[in-house]
């Protein structure tokens, strides 16, 4: 019963992924395309959960849905893009696109077929290797062990590279204008009461009238 339920969920998520992926490229409204893209990511995360890799599924949802797809949505909604011109270019180059897509699917199919044949050959030549006791650890713990032990230095270097890239983007986009007042926190913290408050003695009847 459990096996049939897993199969049913697999076919359900697969059908939803295919449907939403087709709607991404066939929707006339670009906002709807981005929303269908988010739906595709969620269903792909469901397929990954069925494979038992819940950490990758949560990473997919958090990174791609929470950041990348939302960024796409904001960019599409904020930019005034001439989508009619894009559609004309799409129709003009549809033959080239179909050829590239066919080549891509052939490459993916050859990779999957080669991996399947290799796994079958390995199991036939060495059947005892397929029945090895695996340590009972979670996917998150396994990825953490590899990431923070074997690739710890590479992980730190990549973090430094991202930090430099972020600072460089801020420096490149920062523009100093002469007539713009800027906040000086040091001067604000160092000011005294006499510099901040002026006590004025207003005579009776000569104040501000509303």
Image (tube, grey):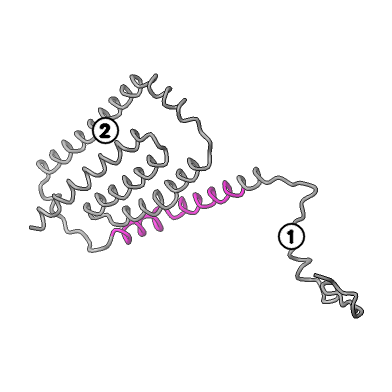
Look at the image and say whether residue 86 sits in the magenta stretch.
no
Q: Quadrant of residue 100?
A: top left
Which quadrant, please, contains the N terminus? bottom left
Q: How many marks?
A: 2
Indicate left or right for 135 with 205 as reference. left
Q: Quadrant of residue 149?
A: bottom left
Instruction: Give me the disc on residue 183.
Output: 1
Q: Position of residue 193 (x, y in %)?
A: 82, 77
Q: Residues within 10 Å of mark 2 (few under 14, many from 20)?
A: few
Indicate left or right for 43 with 90 as reference. left
Give the distance between the C-alpha atoms of the residues marked 1 and 2, in whole angstroms.
55 Å
Which quadrant, please, contains the C terminus? bottom right
**In the depicted view, which residue is nearer to us: 104 or 136?**
104
Q: Is residue 210 above or below residue 134?
A: below
Secondary structure mostly seen in the magenta stretch: helix
Q: Residues within 10 Å of mark 1 (few under 14, many from 20)?
A: few
Q: Which residues are magenta?
A: 139-167
Q: Which residue is mark 2?
A: 108
- Identified at 49% across, 54% down, the residue is 156
Q: Position of residue 202 (x, y in %)?
A: 90, 78
Nearer the observer: mark 1 or 2; the answer is 1
Q: Position of residue 11 (x, y in %)?
A: 17, 46
Indicate left or right for 160 with 67 as reference. right
Indicate left or right for 3 with 180 as reference. left
Farthest residue in the left direction? 1
- Identified at 20% across, 59% down, the residue is 134
């Amino acid at each position: 019963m459990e096996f049939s339920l897993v199969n049913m969920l697999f076919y359900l998520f697969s059908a939803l992924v295919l449907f939403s992926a087709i709607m991404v490229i066939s929707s006339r409204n670009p906002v709807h395309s981005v929303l269908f893209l988010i739906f595709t990511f969620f269903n792909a995360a469901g397929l990954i959960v069925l494979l038992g890799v819940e950490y990758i599924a949560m990473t997919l949802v958090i990174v791609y849905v929470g950041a990348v797809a939302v960024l796409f949505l904001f960019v599409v909604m904020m930019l005034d893009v001439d989508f009619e011109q894009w559609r004309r270019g799409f129709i003009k180059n549809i033959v080239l696109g179909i050829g590239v897509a066919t080549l891509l699917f052939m490459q993916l199919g050859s990779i999957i077929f080669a991996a399947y044949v290799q796994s079958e050959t390995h199991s036939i030549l060495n059947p005892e290797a397929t029945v090895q006791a695996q340590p009972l650890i979670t996917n998150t713990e396994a990825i953490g062990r590899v990431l923070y032990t074997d690739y710890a230095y590479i992980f730190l270097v990549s973090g430094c590279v991202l930090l430099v890239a972020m600072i460089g983007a801020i420096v490149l986009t920062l523009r100093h204008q002469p007539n713009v007042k800027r906040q000086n926190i040091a001067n604000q913290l160092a000011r005294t009461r006499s510099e901040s408050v002026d006590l004025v003695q207003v005579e009776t009847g000569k104040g501000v009238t509303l």
